[in-house]
Amino acid sequence: MDVRSVDTSKCVVWDMHSRLVESLDDDGCAEMIRSVRLHGQKRPALGRRVTRGDGYEIELIYGARRLFAAQQLRIQLLVEVRDIDDQAAMIEMDVENRIRTDISAYERGLTYARSLRRSLFSTQAEMAKALGISEAKLSRLLRYAELPATVVGAFSSPLDIREDWAGALAKASANSTTRERLTQKARDLRRSPLQLRSAEAVFESLIHAGRDKNAYVKCKERDEVVKNQEGTPLFRVGIRLNTVHFVFSRERVTPDLLRELTSVVTDAVVAFDSKRTSGPSIVDRRGALLSSNGSAHKEFTKSTSAM
């Protein structure tokens, strides 16, 4: 292993690195600076030799925060130097990033998209296999790269955007009927006071932008407990991004009650849909609460502790 102490002025970060430039500051690197000051640099960065006319000699594949910390502390940087091509460098960087828990899904998604644009991999399938992740996981992460800058800017930090949110927002942004309302809402949120822009509130505002306020119910982190007049819990209602769950304890539901519940819910959905003159059924929009043949979507739990 060729590990060297390198003058930081001779190091430049690879333009494919995953770190967002805005995260490489005193606040974003505070813990790294503190650790290096107290304990020294425990893990070397990974780099390769470069020949270029701007004075740089080492291109860092990963280790951007370690470089920033060394620069702030005015010390040399430990670098493992290898002869490595772009595809191998991408794989090494991704392995390192997944070991470190502070790399966000957003940063990974943008890096994967850049890798495909650079033709480091010929297809998504080849890339997923080389990185050791599923094609479905890769596709979800790539949705981050589809988000308009205006939408990303509505959040206090792009690192706040969750993976499931990225998919929903990318889909809404690609829809010509909702894109304009979505981007306008993003601009409005961008101008709102920072303390009012929690990540959850921003997502809810964006995803429901321009829609009938009565057409969709909002996601909730906690289930709503429905009780009878005596205050005894009967069941819970869980509202997620794409689904609504009515949750009963298994002990409470007998075959007869299950048939009755299925009948009641079916009648309610059919009656509600019949009032609409156009558009997809609420079943389709809310994640198939009932299947097309009217069978109930059941989710039970053996425990009543949450009730």
Image (cartoon, rainbow, N blue to C red):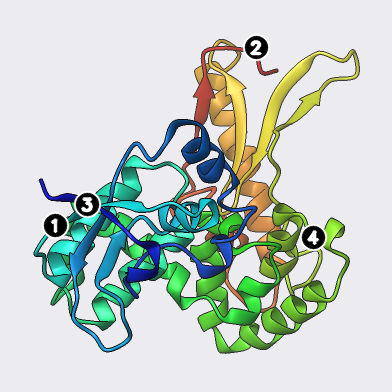
Residue 25 found in image quarter? bottom right
**Residue 4 disc label:** 3
- Amino acid carrying label 1: it is Lys
Say what amino acid the circle numbered 4 marks.
Answer: Arg
Residue placed most toward the observer, 275 or 18: 18
Between 60 and 294, which is closer to the camera in this rendering? 60
The three-letter code of the residue at mark 2 reads: Ser
Quadrant holding the N terminus: top left
Q: Earlier in the sequence, mark 1 or mark 4?
A: 1
Contact? badges 1 and 3 (CB < 8 Å):
no
**First along the sequence among labels 1 and 3:** 3
CA distance for labels 1 and 4: 38 Å
The residue at 33%/46% (across/down) is 98
Q: Could you say which is closer to the camera, residue 158 or residue 221?
A: 158
Question: Disc 4 or 3, which lies upstream in sequence?
Answer: 3
Q: Position of residue 32 (x, y in %)?
A: 51, 44
**Under tag 4, what secondary structure?**
loop
Identify the residue position indicated by label 4 in the image: 197
User: Where is 48 relative to 244, above or below?
Assistant: below
Q: Residue at x 70, y 34 (%)?
A: 222
Q: Earlier in the sequence, mark 4 or mark 2?
A: 4
Q: To which residue does mark 1 refer?
A: 129
In the rendered image of this protein, does residue 75 appear above or below residue 107?
A: above
Q: Is 192 on the left-hand or right-hand side of 75? A: right
Marks 4/2: CA–CA distance:
33 Å
Q: Which residue is mark 2?
A: 305
| For marks 2 and 3 on the same chain, the one whose residue lies earlier in the sequence | 3
> What residue is drawn where x is 90% and y is 19%?
229
